[in-house]
């Protein structure tokens, strides 16, 4: 049995963060970089897994895997196009431990969504038109890899979801990882001198940069990209779980602290999708709390906030509203994304069976990119799988409106849809794995509720 509590998870998070910072400072003092620290971390986790054994070790390793969302763009380069992210390597290790566990204790029945099973053959099909169109095999591997590794991740989540303490430790660790991203990005932004203490961690020469609208955006160079806050935004709904897990004054203070760090980090990133995700999260959680009255009050709050925003933030927001009011896209980044989506749509209409993995390039929209690469039917199946999961989640919520854990999972899953539709993260392991992680959580939770305790609240 694996038991945990928010206090233990919090202690683990704080100790991990402090230890990581101290070790990082020490090795950069000797001109070593983040990669060396990563090797030390992996060795430490592997030793921990071995010492704890397959059951506790698998749980411990998975929690560590969640915290590895902070690794960012640091990958192992195989070719100029193909890179292997440490998240993939560590996921393989965890899957091997799961295999050993199943071999030791007997079979465990894994139930995958039917639409996912129907979607899988298209992953293999994507190589055929790719080879016909002369796409390098390594390019196709790079684009398809993150889909294939969705299966072992789902298997690990489905297996561990039945263990006591899983939901508490996994959701709080996800929140901790997202909060840490915002904390480090804010620290670098407001205290640029910290960059001199750990130069091996920094992947940019500046602590921030000006966007086209004049907004000075944080670089998040420790992660490697401003879009790091997408992970933080996905974890934001988990903030509502803190006072549930830790009742009393301390839980409320901790929730406010995490909200402040996440809000600050997401704001200074200047990432418009993340800003939208914050608003959507607040509206959904308000609806789950007190219905449409909460939506109205929260909407009024954001209207008041809008009027007090500085001019550079208003200019950044206007890049989204201007196309709706005038029909013209003035922002070059937004214009590029729209063009990529339109080109992919044209490509899929001309090639209804797909052009092969990586054939459409980076579309900045995963549903559209899958349809262009693997064929229109594959794109429809992918979108249908997401919408069907969302529909099942809504049905479950309607039957169990007081299930506060599921409210957070459902909110985060809705945010995943925004990311998949507007960001295009399937080729970036550091972004797609958090999306698959949330998807796996909500699938496992609905399966557990249906099989174990229908229409009631199971162990959280």
Image (cartoon, helix red, strand yellow):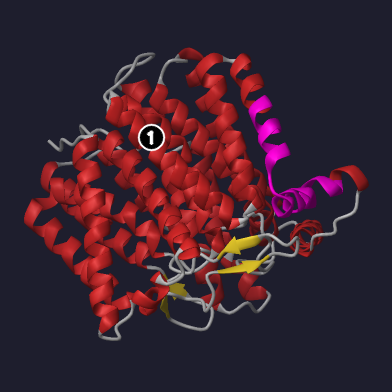
Estimate the x, y position of residue 88 in percent, counting from the top left: 37, 63
Estimate the x, y position of residue 84 in percent, counting from the top left: 41, 72
Estimate the x, y position of residue 151 in percent, counting from the top left: 40, 51
Location of mark 1 (residue): 255
- Quarter of the image with the N terminus in it: top left
Give the residue furthest to the left: 51
Q: Residues within 10 Å of mark 1 (few under 14, many from 20)?
A: some
Give above or below for 33 relative to 189. Answer: below
Q: In the image shown, does 214 or 152 lie closer to the viewer? A: 214
Give above or below for 424 relative to 278. Answer: below
Whether residue 117 is visible? no
Give above or below for 245 relative to 418. Answer: above
Whether residue 364 is visible? yes
Q: Main secondary structure of the magenta part?
A: helix
The structure residue drawn at horizontal position 39% and vertical position 13%, both measured from the top left corner, is 455
Report whether 366 appears left or right of 264.
right
Report whether 200 appears left or right of 293.
left
Which element type, helix, strand or loop, lies under badge 1? Answer: helix
Q: Is residue 20 magenta-colored?
A: no
Give the residue furthest to the bottom: 31
Q: In the image shown, does 64 or 12 lie closer to the viewer? A: 12
Q: Is residue 317 magenta-colored?
A: yes
The structure residue drawn at horizontal position 73% and vertical position 62%, both measured from the top left corner, is 214
Q: Which residues are magenta?
A: 300-323
The structure residue drawn at horizontal position 54% and vertical position 14%, both measured from the top left corner, is 290
Q: In the image shown, does 340 or 72 lie closer to the viewer? A: 72
The structure residue drawn at horizontal position 68% and vertical position 54%, both measured from the top left corner, is 371
Among the 4 quarters of the image, the one containing residue 291: top right
Report whether 376 appears left or right of 98.
right
Among the 4 quarters of the image, the one containing residue 408: top left
Report whether 109 appears left or right of 422.
left
């Amino acid at each position: 049995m694996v038991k945990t509590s928010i206090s233990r998870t919090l202690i683990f998070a704080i100790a991990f963060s402090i230890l990581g910072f101290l070790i990082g400072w020490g090795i950069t003092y000797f001109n070593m970089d983040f990669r060396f620290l990563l090797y030390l971390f992996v060795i430490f986790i592997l030793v921990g897994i071995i010492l704890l054994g397959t059951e506790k070790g698998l749980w411990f390793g998975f929690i560590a895997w969640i915290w590895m969302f902070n690794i960012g763009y640091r990958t192992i380069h195989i070719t100029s196009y193909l890179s292997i992210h440490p998240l993939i390597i560590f996921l393989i290790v965890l899957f091997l431990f799961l295999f050993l566990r199943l071999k030791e204790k007997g079979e465990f029945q894994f139930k995958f969504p039917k639409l996912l099973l129907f979607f899988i053959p298209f992953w293999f099909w994507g190589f055929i038109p790719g080879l016909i169109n002369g796409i390098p095999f390594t390019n196709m591997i790079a684009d398809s890899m993150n889909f294939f590794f969705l299966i072992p991740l789902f298997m690990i989540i489905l297996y561990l979801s039945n263990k006591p303490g899983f939901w508490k430790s996994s959701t709080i660790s996800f929140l901790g990882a997202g909060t840490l991203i915002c904390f480090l990005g804010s620290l670098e932004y407001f205290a640029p001198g910290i960059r001199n203490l750990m130069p091996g961690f920094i992947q940019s020469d500046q602590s921030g940069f000006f966007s086209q609208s004049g907004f000075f955006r944080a670089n998040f160079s420790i992660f490697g990209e401003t879009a790091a806050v997408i992970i933080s935004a996905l974890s934001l709904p988990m903030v509502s779980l803190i006072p549930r897990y830790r009742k009393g004054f301390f839980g409320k203070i901790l929730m406010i602290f995490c909200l402040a760090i996440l809000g600050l980090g997401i704001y200074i990133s200047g990432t418009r999708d993340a800003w939208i995700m914050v608003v959507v999260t607040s509206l959904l959680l308000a609806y789950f709390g007190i219905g449409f009255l909460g939506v109205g009050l929260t909407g009024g709050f954001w209207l008041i906030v809008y009027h007090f925003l500085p001019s550079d933030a208003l200019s950044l927001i206007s890049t989204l509203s201007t196309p709706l009011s005038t029909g013209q896209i003035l922002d070059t980044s937004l214009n590029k994304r729209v063009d990529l989506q339109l080109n992919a749509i044209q490509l899929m209409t001309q090639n209804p069976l797909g052009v092969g993995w990586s054939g459409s390039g980076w579309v900045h929209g995963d549903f559209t990119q899958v349809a262009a690469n693997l064929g229109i039917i594959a794109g429809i199946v992918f979108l249908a799988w997401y919408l069907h999961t969302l529909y099942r989640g809504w049905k479950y919520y309607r039957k169990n409106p007081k299930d506060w854990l599921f409210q957070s999972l459902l909110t985060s899953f809705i945010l995943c849809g925004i990311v998949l539709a507007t960001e295009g993260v399937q080729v970036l392991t550091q972004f797609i794995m958090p999306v698959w992680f949330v998807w796996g959580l909500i699938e496992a939770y609905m399966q557990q509720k249906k099989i174990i305790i229908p229409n009631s609240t199971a162990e959280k």
